[in-house]
Amino acid sequence: MTLDDALEALKAHVETGRAQGMASYHKQTREVLGIPNPALNDLTKEWRQTLDVEERVALASALWDTDIFEARIAAAKMLTQARIRPDDAVWDLIQSWVPQFDSWAIADHVCMAGQKRLMADPSRIDDVEAWTTSDHKWTRRAALVITLPWTKQNFPKPNDLEIRDRVLGWAGTYVPDHEWFIQKSIAWWLRDLSKHDAPRVEAFLASHAGDMKPSAVKEARKYMK
């Protein structure tokens, strides 16, 4: 499938009048076509089933480079799959996109694809750690969003607990940064973790709540008694 074929398929699902509202909601200055998410899901599912890994990586890269909002979302969705072999090229492409993040929706879709690759090879957490000292807020935020699967395990193995503590350490270094998206990412990680490992969240808040934004503390405690 060529890039032109993919763009034609995407544009066939444009809904008249939708683009302006989407651009406003997502605060986009790039081109927004006005395609609903279910249509993107259907298209990218089909592409995942018909293209091999090399073809998917090439098309995802080309879609991303158009800088069209829905094309970037579709690029991420093409790579969101638990089992991809080999997947080194997929992980490399995802990493190359992170410094370009400027929108929560695009960033979160890419991070969902990245979560699958991290779970497939947890040693990649070393790559993610380098993001935590970036001057780019979206890169720093991505380090917490992409590691969210480690908040959800009911029966974590010792290595999973080590990663949990490692990410909580990163979150601790973020606390002095009161930028909204950074505080929200800390709260998101703690909130999700609280449903499975409340003691770790309590320990984190005991050390850091006084320096966090009150709204972030409230969000972190959302599911805690």
Image (cartoon, rainbow, N blue to C red):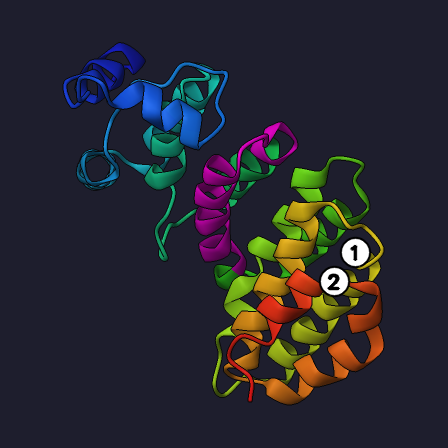
Badge 2 amino acid: Ala
Foreground of the two, 142 or 155: 142
In which quadrant of the rendered image does the C terminus lie?
Answer: bottom right
In this rendering, the count of numbered labels is: 2
Q: Which residues are magenta?
A: 97-118
Q: Quadrant of residue 14?
A: top left
| Alpha-carbon span between mark 2 and mark 1 | 5 Å
Q: Is residue 147 above or below residue 79?
A: below
Residue 113 highlighted magenta (yes or no): yes
The percent position of residue 26, horizontal first and vertical second, equals: 45, 31
- Left/right placement of residue 38 relative to residue 91 reads left
Q: Quadrant of residue 31?
A: top left
Q: Is residue 164 above or below residue 51?
A: below
For the point 21% across and 14% down, which residue is it? 5
Foreground of the two, 95 or 54: 95
Which numbered circle lies on residue 171?
A: 2
- Left/right placement of residue 193 relative to residue 130 reads left
Could you tell me which secondary element the residue under label 1 belongs to?
A: helix
Foreground of the two, 48 or 15: 15
